[in-house]
Amino acid sequence: MNKKVIFPVTRIHNPMLLEAWLDNGEIKDAFISDTLYRGFEQILIGRSPMDMPYYTQRICGICSSAHAITAALAVEKALGMEVPPNGILIRNLIFASDMIQNHIRHLYLYALPDYFRGPDLAPFIPHSESDLRLSKQENTLLSEHYFKALEISRAAHAAFAVFGGKAPHGHGIVPGGASMEVDADKVNRYRGYIIEILSFLDDTLLPDVDLIIKRYPDYVDIGAGNGNYISVGGFPNPEGGTLFPQGVLILDERQSFYEKYITEDVTHAWYKPHGPLHPSVEDTIPDHSQNKGYTWVKSPRYRGQPVEVGPLARAIINKEKVIGHGALARIWARSLEIKKIALATLVWLNRLEPGAETLNCKIKQNSGSSVGLHEAMRGFLGHWLQVKNGRVEHYQIITPSAFNFGARDESGTRSVGESSLLGLKVQSEDLKEAGRVIRSFDPCFSCSVHLIDGEHTRTLGIK
Ligand code: NFE
């Protein structure tokens, strides 16, 4: 077998590394490693729970509001806070615009360049010349759309700032609701951005995704996961229910989601060893001397099983008909989801009550344990919190990219990201086929571990 490495794997999140083992042009084994550790969970200890949405947003710049909303949910449950309806709607609007921003940037900046060839100019160079199937005209069109997508994703961030004050790392989502008041000017400005985004979706983005699927039909199923999917739900309605459903599809069976079945394993990650533990009792103690370790990403499991999370999982849990389960099926699900969210914002905007309260800061107690769960851009996000006498005593975070790209577990079972590469036929020198599969998950390794390790940024360091 011969070894090939892609590093970095994505066009933005530097620390992700793929080590693939090939035999006769086929991937027989794969290790995905995160070479970055930051220690957010330790940073949070001893602080005021009210600051958790602020601190945890700094985990990442592209999904900041996902952490804000999930942290706020955890704090509200622990302290017994109730969010007024306007607060719920404004938080949905802030998070929706951030999700739209994320999905548009992922598609044009991080995923589609795997399928089209841009001009010999930055940001399209260096090029990969393997397996390019679009005509010259189609390549030109998609290159133009790449720049248009930048403008539109900026409009999504501008919508975020209407109720969030700024983007990323906004000020709008706080424990107890939303910090902004509602007025007609904000509603109209937000709506204006969404109308602009909707016409870009209909005229440009969705037809572009259709074109790529038409030219690369094999990638609809190439890179499929293991058939296990989870969504923890998200975008609550004030009267109950959520836009994104909650559920589990595991070992071919649909089940209700129970948070108690979540565990994390660190057998092959660089942490102080422990068996699979529920996040409420788990710690995060870095230990780079672990011989079996090859990444900073732990291994989250549901009922001991690796699961896939993200827009495709949400569509499947929502019982939508999907086109397949591979790389382009993920991209297709993500692109349709943008429209679903954009349309939902128009409903939420209409339901806002100008002048009604958006924030309720009353707390029932100053100690408590809880979990905040909310779908992030890339899927499952959980914040486990313990507060004692008004201070954070314990905090653990599981992100979507940890679910998709965690290390193999104590039984040696791979997470979905690694297993989706097994058997993949590779003809390109640059492992483009594998890159397409990995990037379709929209991985983010800033989120997945929460110090730059100079020693291990170029090798996996498997000892
Ligand atoms: Ni840095 Fe994030 C999302 C979180 S990671 S992008 O979505 O949480 O998977």
Image: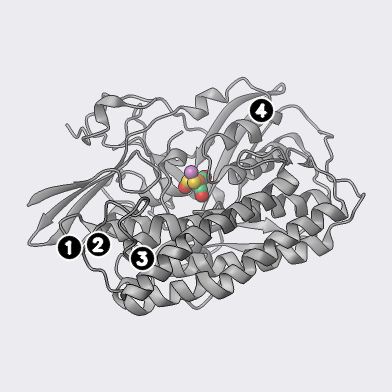
Mark positioned earlier in the residue sequence (3 or 1):
3
Q: Are marks 4 and 3 in contact (CB under 8 Å)?
A: no
**Badge 4 density bin: few <14, some 14–19, many ≥20, Cα 10 Å:** many
Q: Amino acid at mark 3?
A: Ala
Q: Secondary structure at mark 1?
A: loop
Q: Secondary structure at mark 2?
A: helix
Mark 1 vs ligand 1: CB under 8 Å? no
Q: Are marks 4 and 1 in contact (CB under 8 Å)?
A: no
Q: CA distance from mark 4 to mark 3?
A: 41 Å
On the image, numbered disc 1 is attached to which residue? Answer: 426
Q: Are marks 3 and 1 in contact (CB under 8 Å)?
A: no
Q: Nearer the viewer, residue 443 or 238?
A: 443
Q: Amino acid at mark 4?
A: Val
Nearer the observer, disc 4 or disc 3? 3
On the image, numbered disc 4 is attached to which residue? Answer: 387
Q: Secondary structure at mark 3?
A: helix
On the image, numbered disc 3 is attached to which residue? Answer: 327
Mark 3 vs ligand 1: CB under 8 Å? no
Q: Residue at x 49, y 49 (%)?
A: 261
**Vertical side of 376 occupied by 326: above or below:** below
Mark positioned earlier in the residue sequence (2 or 3):
3
In the rendered image, the quadrant that contains the C terminus is: top left
Quarter occupied by residue 16: top left
Q: Report how many numbered discs are placed on residues in the image.
A: 4
